[in-house]
Image: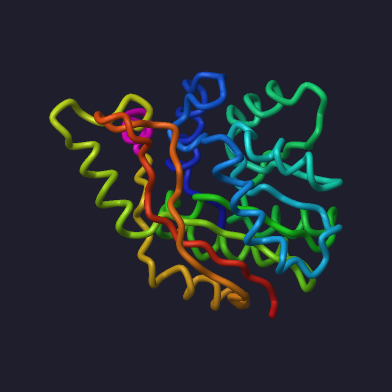
Amino acid sequence: MSVTTRYREAWEGFWSEAPGEQGAVFWDAEPAVTAGVHLALFEPHLAAPGLPLVDLGCGNGTQTRFLADRYPRVIGADLSAAALDHARLADPAGQASYRLFDAAEKVEAETLHAELGDANVYMRGVLHQCERDDRQALVDGLATLVGDRGRAFLVELAEAAGVILRGLAQGPGGPPAKLAPVFRHGIAPGEVADAAVPEYLRAAGLAVLASGELPLVTTEYSADGTRIELPSKWVVVGRG
């Protein structure tokens, strides 16, 4: 099962229109407040830190480049060719490698695992933007990449974030400038139920090794000048 055509086209359209500069996209916050914070939670649970690291749903590669400064082999994977164009352009030295990849497609996940072996995976805010019917297949693909020795760090918007985002979208002036393209392309963030995530993981054979809550920092600001932060939940998973 691969992701739906509508979902793929939505992301291709989004990234084709997205500005190239870092911080222009709603969730493209600087690594110091995103991947840097997450690594402090993730690294204590890595059974094999030397494994390849896959940034799954890497988008324009802001976090991928940060990860590539810290690990010997980092692969940014995304289903949008336009996103990967942004990522490669922003990484002229080739710190990381980039791959067009549909994690919900079983054969693609198996092929990448055969190439890399077991991998550690970083996935920030991907599942909650998936079509409902794609979510289990995506987590199954994640489990394939992790294999027996890898670990994965997932951070996803909490249900409460969906309420906040819809409220922002329905404000008197319409959604904030950086959020508007998300809704315009039919991408519906914050749509996965909190209780569903552990079920997807269990069904894929993954065990939760650690979990917690923290705000997901965005690049957008509210009318009073404060940065918009959204409630999110994180988990570290592996085969146990």
Magenta residues span 180-186
Horizontal placement of 185 versus 4: left or right?
left
Q: Picture quarter containing residue 139?
A: bottom right
Horizontal placement of 132 versus 66: left or right?
left
Residue depicted at x 84% and y 46%: 73
Q: Is residue 87 magenta?
A: no
Horizontal placement of 104 versus 6: left or right?
right
Measuring from the top left, give residue 15's x and y in whole percent. Answer: 51, 28
User: In this view, which residue lies farthest toward the bottom?
Assistant: 240
Q: Taking 91 as reference, is 48 above or below it?
A: below
Measuring from the top left, give residue 205's x and y in whole percent. Answer: 62, 77
Residue depicted at x 47% and y 29%: 25
Name the foreground residue: 38 vs 13: 38
Measuring from the top left, give residue 115's x and y in whole percent. Answer: 85, 53
Q: Main secondary structure of the magenta part?
A: helix
Residue depicted at x 48% and y 60%: 135
The quadrant the C terminus occupies is: bottom right
Q: Picture quarter containing residue 96?
A: top right
Q: Taking 62 as reference, is 90 above or below it?
A: above
Name the foreground residue: 83 vs 3: 83
Q: Taking 58 as reference, is 16 above or below it?
A: above
